[in-house]
Image (cartoon, rainbow, N blue to C red):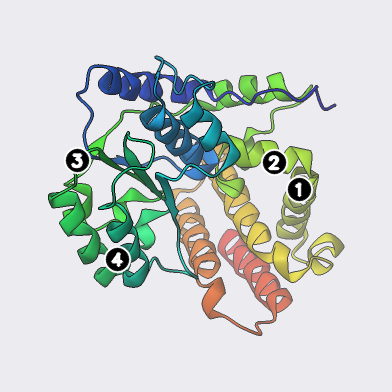
Amino acid sequence: MMKQEGTMLLPWLTEPTASFCHQLMTRQQGHAYLLGIHQGYGGMELAQTLAQAALCTATTTTGGCGVCKSCQLFAAGNHPDFYHLEADGNQIKVDQVRELCQKLTATAQQGGMRVAVLKNCERLNTAAANALLKTLEEPGKQTLLLLQSDTPSRLMATISSRCQRLHCQLPSRQAVQTWLNEQFSLERDVTWCLPVVGGPVDLLSALKDERYETLVSLRKAWIQSLSSGHLCANLTNINEKQVSDALKVLYVVLRQKLVKQKNADALINIKITKFAAEVMETYHSLSMMPNVNFMAVFQAFILEYQSLTTS
């Protein structure tokens, strides 16, 4: 049952926010920060909070004051000294970065800082990353870059090495369940699908729009199909948009089987581990696989699982 809507607080972001605000208030902040926090765990919410705090004229220990002119402009989405950059298609391109860097050289219209948030900065292509390097190495005064990344390991070392980090202790599954229960009245643990949806924020959205119930149905379908050796109806009736979810749910089901049967035949467990990796490789290749008969792929997976566990 849905509880009444309120301000969505992400308690695990309190510490990095407080640390950054302390640096602002003591004028010790850096000019660039890498926020290696997945959007599903609030990576963009953190970036927005820090951006507002940096632009605020009366920063508090928890972020912007919310009442000054700068905060009001930010809340309205039209602060003239705030810039947002994200991928054009699958990449952040060099022309986008050059345009941003040019804007950051202009005088701040509100007399304070100029702040830019780069969403999914790991999508910077090589030319764009090189264009950004100059600004990272020689930032203008009162300039702040906040680079959010779902997968910071994919970011060029020359970029990440020029950014400061804010420590963020991600929540345990129990902490996630507790937080979700503050938004919903939950009768069961729903955190099993965190690897499927991406993080607590995504899981909350999935609970709101009934995507979660679809994921539960997919999990039951895979368990039944792997056991019987036949593709059950719930897997044959999915649409193209649900294929990626189906593959990620299969991966989770296989990983859970390994946990439950950790004392089983070691050779079979090794084979299932390799099979799970194959499933994820198929998931990552989705964008490169147009016009694929996914029902045939699903059936092949079931047959492969049967051969692994009965040979």
Q: Disc 4 marks which amino acid?
A: Arg
Q: Which residue is mark 2?
A: 205
Query: Which tag, 4 or 1, sits closer to the chain's start?
Result: 4
Indicate the quadrant where residue 92 lies. bottom left
Quadrant position of the N terminus in the picture = top right
The Cα–Cα distance between marks 4 and 1, rounded to whole angstroms, is 39 Å
> What residue do we see at 63% from left, 33% from top?
191
Where is residue 265? Give x, y as percent. 49, 48
Who is closer to the viewer here, 232 or 118? 118
Query: Which tag, 1 or 3, sits closer to the chain's start?
Result: 3
Q: Disc 3 marks which amino acid?
A: Lys
| Secondary structure type for disc 2 | helix
> Is 68 left, or right, of 252 in this rendering?
left
Tag of residue 211? 1
Q: Which residue is mark 4?
A: 98
Taking the view exactly as shown, the residue that stands out farthest to the left is 138
> What residue do we see at 36% from left, 30% from top?
54
Query: Which tag, 3 or 2, sits closer to the chain's start?
Result: 3
